[in-house]
Image (tube, rainbow, N blue to C red):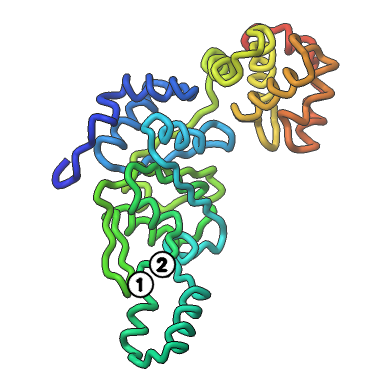
């Protein structure tokens, strides 16, 4: 680990403990993801999570924060995001008030006033700077594929040293690096240089048994029969030619909606009337309505 600050005993000792702690938060991981998380914690390497929307990438960061009793700090990326929106900015209204107050009492030392204007009091820490200055912290850089090349290059530099330079204040460095999770839905390819800095994990849609376990963990009040029916139906829908195959989040939404309706069993008629809980495109709903939903619900495990 070189010169890195060693982790405290608050961090899991190995992949199995990572798996156990995440399970205690309601987030179930397989062996591969447990190992990836353990290595990210041990080596202070960002974890780059890629896969379809709704497969649990963003939720992983929240689960890690709960498992580590750390603050979750989220940076939502979007087209056109720049450093001032992600890193820091100056509180110009407060600076102006300070300047006017100083002038009102007759302060004339221009150099001293200028230094005071760029004091910590007026620094507005955005998510990236907050993550560097907070311990313990989990930094979620969500949908990094929506940002542009320049912002990617900035992230690469930041994640290499876990330090930023504020010209007026100097270099601000993390005493202990935050745990960093980056997510991508692959709307475009992220540069290899950023991926090389990270540990990589591809998120597949889970198999029937694991998805059912996730649903039961998140919604323990629903019957296993209803959870299994919905999970099987979603597994079948994913094999159809849909614009947006449903993720685990949609499976949970569907079960939750049915539970709110007081249902303890899913039949074809109820499935049709509640498809909007699991499918989000008109074309996908139309496609689902052409299926023999009675046969789908009768097939064990979505087979």
Pointer 2 local density, CA inside 10 Å: few below 14, some 14–19, many at least 20? some
Q: CA distance from mark 2 to mark 1?
A: 7 Å
Q: Is residue 160 left or right of residue 58?
A: left
What percent of the width, then of the height, locates residue 294?
79, 11
Outermost residue, left side: 2
Pointer 1 local density, CA inside 10 Å: few below 14, some 14–19, many at least 20? few
Q: Is residue 72 above or below residue 225?
A: below
Q: Is residue 122 above or below residue 289?
A: below
Q: Please name whichever residue, 165 or 193, is drawn nearer the observer in this view of the structure.
A: 165
What percent of the width, then of the height, locates residue 240?
69, 26
Would you identify the image quadrant in which residue 15 lies?
A: top left
Q: Quadrant of the C terminus?
A: top right
* Mark 1: secondary structure: loop
What percent of the width, then of the height, locates residue 279?
73, 31
* Mark 2: secondary structure: strand
| Label at residue 264 | none
Q: Which residue is mark 1?
A: 119
| Label at residue 123 | 2
Would you identify the image quadrant in which residue 297 lies?
A: top right
Q: Please name whichever residue, 102 or 183, is drawn nearer the observer in this view of the structure.
A: 102
| Residue lying at 71% horizontally and 28% vertically, measured from the top left | 278
Q: Does residue 150 appear anywhere in the picture?
A: no
What percent of the width, then of the height, locates residue 107?
38, 89
Q: Does residue 93 appear anywhere in the picture?
A: yes
Would you identify the image quadrant in which residue 69 lies?
A: top left
Disc 2 to disc 1: CB gap under 8 Å:
yes
| Residue lying at 30% horizontally and 36% vertically, measured from the top left | 41
């Amino acid at each position: 680990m070189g010169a890195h600050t060693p982790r405290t005993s608050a961090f899991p000792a190995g992949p199995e403990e990572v798996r156990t702690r995440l399970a205690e938060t309601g987030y179930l991981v397989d062996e591969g993801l447990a190992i990836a998380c353990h290595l990210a914690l041990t080596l202070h390497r960002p974890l780059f999570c890629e896969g379809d929307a709704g497969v649990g990438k963003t939720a992983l960061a929240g689960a890690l924060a709960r498992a580590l009793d750390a603050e979750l700090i989220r940076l939502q990326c979007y087209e056109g995001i720049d450093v001032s929106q992600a890193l820091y900015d100056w509180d110009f209204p407060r600076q102006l008030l300070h300047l006017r107050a100083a002038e009102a009492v007759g302060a004339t030392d221009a150099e001293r006033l200028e230094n005071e204007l760029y004091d910590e009091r007026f620094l507005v820490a955005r998510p990236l700077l907050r993550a560097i200055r907070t311990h313990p912290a989990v930094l979620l850089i969500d949908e990094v594929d929506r940002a542009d090349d320049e912002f990617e290059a900035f992230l690469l530099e930041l994640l290499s040293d876990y330090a930023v330079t504020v010209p007026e204040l100097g270099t601000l460095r993390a005493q202990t690096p935050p745990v960093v999770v980056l997510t991508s839905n692959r709307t475009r390819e992220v540069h290899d240089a950023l991926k090389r800095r990270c540990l990589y994990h591809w998120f597949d849609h889970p198999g029937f048994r694991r998805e059912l376990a996730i649903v039961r963990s998140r919604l323990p009040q629903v019957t296993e029969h209803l959870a299994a029916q919905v999970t099987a139906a979603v597994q079948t829908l994913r094999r159809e030619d849909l614009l947006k195959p449903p993720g685990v989040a949609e499976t949970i939404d569907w079960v939750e909606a049915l539970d709110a309706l007081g249902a303890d069993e899913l039949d074809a008629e109820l499935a049709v009337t509640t498809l909007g809980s699991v499918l989000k495109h008109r074309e996908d709903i139309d496609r689902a309505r052409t299926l023999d939903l009675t046969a789908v619900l009768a097939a064990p495990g979505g087979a």
